[in-house]
Amino acid sequence: MGAISAGAAGVLTGGLQKILAAVPEAPDSTFQLGGDLLVNRLGFGAMRLTGEGIWGWPPDREGAKKVLRRAVELGVNFIDTADAYGPETNELLIAEALYPYPKGLVIATKGGNTRPGPGQWVPDGRPEYLAQCVDKSLKRLKLDRIDLYQLHRIDSKVPVEESLGALKAAQDAGKIRHVGLSEVTVAQIEQAKKVVPIVSIQNQYNITDRDSEGALNYCEKEKMGFIPWAPIGGSRNASLRKTGNALEAEAKRHNVSVVQLALAWLLQKSPVMLPIPGTSSLAHLEENMAAEKLELSPDEWKKIEELARQS
């Protein structure tokens, strides 16, 4: 493929525009999760399809189902949820919208985080509690086996070997295919792997928040999936959506939004990166998914990296 100038722009599906640039080694758009689940690397995080404070049903339940169905139509075959989202309503909504599930759809869920109230999160890693969580998620999602079950948080009050022992037992019983972790350090990953094989890590990570760089590097070395939550900033870090940030001019030059630029950067950052941008808006969903078609040259990628550090 010959080089295409950085100024050459085409039209994306849905009216969005993109810039094409020759990339010597463009990253694969798919990833083998756990060695046997082929997923498109740009997935969908369902957490926002809830009420305020990640509590209760979404205000527009039918609209939320449309978002889920449209995500699948746009090529998403990796959806991330948790029993704590709602709590419970998020898993129920996914089943309402998508069951019977299309072939190849991977639904990843999590357990081990309880919800006393809106905006409140309290880890519970007791093995008996996690065993119940697995069974209840299977029922809500209408699944015989969960493809990826993640320990939502390590509970400091419970030895992690006990928490993961419950997930290993569920895996041995055929209720879970693969096990993942969320918000962990490299040391915690290595500790966990002594109990049960770990195929993925879900830590907060985006172009302006890279505290989990060590965990990402570990995942890349071990060929484990790295699922960045808040891949476009989330509610804690809204800098990517603010006008006047350092990336805005560069995004305009590429005829894309800052969010699209940030997602494209993530996808090209590492071949094990599995971003899960979430939204309750069909328009934002279309915008997010279009980022998959944006390719950055090595020089462009480096420039965006430098600008992001100024954000």
Image: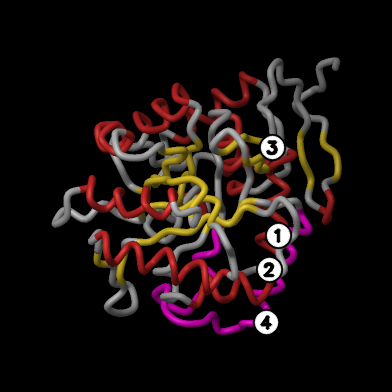
Pointer 1 with pointer 3, Cβ within 8 A: no
Disc 4 packing (10 Å; few <14; some 14–19; many ≥20): few
**Side of 11 relative to 283 (left or right):** right
Q: Position of residue 121 (x, y in %)?
A: 28, 67
Query: What is the three-letter code of the residue carrying label 1?
Result: Ala
Disc 1 packing (10 Å; few <14; some 14–19; many ≥20): many
Cα separation, mark 4 vs mark 2, equals: 9 Å
Q: Residue at x 53, y 57 (%)?
A: 146
Cα separation, mark 2 vs mark 1, equals: 6 Å
Observer-nearest of 63 and 308: 63
Q: Which of the two marks, 3 or 4, is nearer to us in this view?
A: 4
Asked if the magenta segment contains residue 269, the reply would be: no
Q: In the displayed image of the protein, which residue is found farthest to the left?
A: 157
Give the magenta-colored segment's residue range: 45-74
Residue for badge 3: 253
Q: Position of residue 177 (x, y in %)?
A: 52, 48
Labels 3 and 2: the sequence-earlier one: 2
Pointer 2 with pointer 1, Cβ within 8 A: yes
Residue for badge 2: 67
Residue for badge 1: 71
Pointer 3 with pointer 2, Cβ within 8 A: no
Query: What label sits on residue 237 in the rendered view?
Result: none
